[in-house]
Image (cartoon, coloured by chain):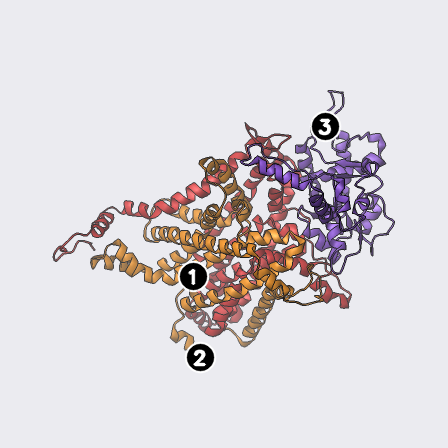
Amino acid sequence: MFRNDIVPEDTDSWSVIWEDEGLQEYAGKISIYDDSIFIADAAVYLKATQPDLGIESPYQLNEEQFDAAVALLKKQAAAGLNYWPGDVAKQIAEYTNGDSVVGTTWPYQYVQLTGADPPVAVTAIKPVEGTTGWSDTWMLYSKAANPNCMYLWMNHMISPEAQAAVAEGFGEAPVNLKACELTENTNHCDDYHADDEAWWEDVYYWTTPVEDCGDDDDSTTCKTQEDWEAAWTEIKG
Amino acid sequence: MVESRLMRILLRGGAVLTLAFIYLPLFVIALYAFNRNVTQAWPIENYSTRWFSVAFHDPDVRDALRNSLIAAVGATAIALVLGTLASLAVSRYRFFGREVITFAVILPIALPGIVTGLALQATIIDVLGPLGIGFGLTTIIVGHATFCIVVIYNNAIARMRRTSGSLDEASADLGADNWQTFRYVMLPQMRTALLAGGLLAFALSFDEVIVTVFTSGAEQTLPIWIFATLARPDDQPIVNVVALFVILVSIIPVYIATRLAGSSGLTAERPKRSAVAANVPAP
Amino acid sequence: MTSVPVYEPPPQESPGRRLSTFFYRHPRVRLWTLLALPVAWLVLVYFGSLFVLLLSSLWETDPFTREVVHTFTLENFQRIFEQDVYRNVASRTVQMAVLVTIADVVLAFPIAYYMARVASPRTRDILVVLILVPLWANYLVKAYAWRTILSEGGVINWALDPFGLHFDGLSTVGLWLVFTYLWLPFMILPIYAGLERIPTSFLEASADLGGRSFTTFARVILPLAFPAIVAGSIFTFCLTLGDYIAPGLITSEQFIGTVIYNIRGEALPTAAAFSLVPIAVVVVYLLVARRLGAFESL
């Protein structure tokens, strides 16, 4: 996401927050999600720009791939970043007041900023290199006292009405496509590519990094969640 | 007065500057309470009182306020008992480990809040959980009381140091038992110090969030409610209204306590400047 | 002196009196009766909890679920010592705490002095109320207000803009300002109390002996107020050391509090190991403060 009045409107690549030019231009005003999972976003960019690293999944990184991602992140951190934690009010305030002008975001902040009074002119894109993402899910506690209530709740949450409300409130694609007829914005499902499977192909879904690289070769090992977290503390310095 | 005229003028200037520094942000908070918009942009474009009625009718705010008052009263009460007992022991006895007591009482407020919070949380989960005690108002009160002891203790011990133990002995000689001596001889001497300490303990508990985050579980005190609400972009104005309300309401108890204790009683005990000394004309 | 009446025994020995006599004859028992509750509370609730936390620094976590596994390891301490980031964060935090303390002393001393020695009793009462009331204004609300004030479109840059100036408020300097602001009342109150304890006769004696205003200030007032300044610094220093909310709001730099807060969920043992750093710093600070006589001035 970027502020229209500051960042060129035709920006379509991650390079604006990974390469020197953009890092110098927007130093101190780059907004980054504060979590070790962001290492995967660096890996997504490397996968597209440095194919010789051989990155398949941005969550399964061997030593060399991982080090490349960390080096890229450290270079970025040196430019001066604003980290936004899971509570999103900080990022919204920063974009409103001009403290941040470009960076990663969730659809929710975009919906809030463009729907504010007065609205903040921002554009949200999926970069050409692809991006990371997730699906919201509900879990049932195995020792829940009243599991039937939870099933009723889950039934409610996948109903078209609830799906429409959640999809528009947060800014996401509903899973139940029947919701598409109930959204206030009749184009919501098209805007969020709810029924466009090809669009989601370069969206890499969050997953926990584990030692097994997911290939047939038993000798290769990948960096684990523990390594990612330790590296994240170090990247932030 | 030994301070020269120039020095007095400089001091007044410094005092005014510091006060301005203290009150400028509070003034900004008050202004934003009247901001019609949800986002806090400057300058404020539209003023409105709409958030006052929203805040007033918010059941979460009322629950949080009630919890905060209960927690502060509970923590202050426990701290009053423990702090007074410890101050009596340390001020009236010499014993091995006396210095350690003072150290141990100060430590809970001096150690980083994040460490205290994490430690209490680990204990509640690992030790109290299996015993069937979970997060709630009780754990909040226990945590607050622990770091409130020090303010009671300090105020009480400063006062005890300046009162004579011979008064207690005279009381015993006249046939009073321990309780009567405490009730009729020591307590009247300590009263204003305890009031001052109690007020600080109350304020400390009422505004605590760093440790409370780790001990509260699902219960919300006012600061916890504020913490949660500030993270939601829609409700920030309500927080400003609530904060302004608390500031304004707090003036009453603080003012009354200042009148009752004499301003000096509110910080620590010290001898009153003698009337004679105060009336000596400046050279 | 004795508690046994010399003239005639009281008509009835009440239980309260008998207990008092017992306590008088056994001062150790009386002492420990007084101490039992506070000591038990501190040991069980506080030191017990610290022990539980520090114990977990010796445990491992499951690499996938990140749950604490009760297997002994020294890896957490190894990580703290080997990775530069932890040392950098610790030294950055201590520096910040020192700078905040200095700023608070500079800001607090004039007003405390004015209250204690210059202001009329009425003005002094009003000033005490004015210093105490901000303590009730919520810490978070104040920190968030500062965010707005310091931001690119905030009050400060709005005021500087006409002069062509710009202040990068959401920075380490900005955080220093915010910490200084947040803990200022905790410095003013002890210094005020300390200054008021100085008998006027000392200052008059200094003047009589030929000490000028400045000499009296430097050689009489400052040494006598010093323990109170150290007492106030315990608050400003320690509160800065343990804060994890304000740093995250104002800067992207990491401090001890923010690191512990951020890793506690997934790497509690490492967080617990890192906790030992601020604990050690605070204990040393308190030991020095005690030697300087600060505990009598808290």
- Judge by depth and name the residue closer to the eye, B178 or A45: A45
Circle 2: residue type: Pro
- For disc 1, the marked residue is B196
Q: Residues at marks 1 and 2, common chain?
A: yes
User: Which chain is mark 2 on?
Assistant: B
Q: x and y percent of residue C69 in the render? A: 56, 29
Query: Residue A75, which numbered label?
Result: none
- Whether residue C230 is visible to the viewer of this picture, yes or no, is no
Query: Residue A222, which numbered label?
Result: 3
From the image, state the color of chain C: red
From the image, state the color of chain B: orange
Circle 1: residue type: Ala
Q: Residues at marks 1 and 3, common chain?
A: no
Distance Cα–Cα, label 1 vs label 3 = 60 Å
Circle 3: residue type: Cys
- Judge by depth and name the residue closer to the eye, B219 or A44: B219
Query: Residue B281, which numbered label?
Result: 2
Relative to A20, does residue A216 appear above or below in the rendering? Answer: above
Q: x and y percent of residue B228 in the render? A: 60, 51
Relative to B86, does residue B4 appear above or below in the rendering? Answer: below
Relative to B32, does residue A41 appear above or below in the rendering? Answer: above
Circles 1 and 2 in contact, beta carbons < 8 Å: no
Q: x and y percent of residue B142 in the render? A: 45, 47
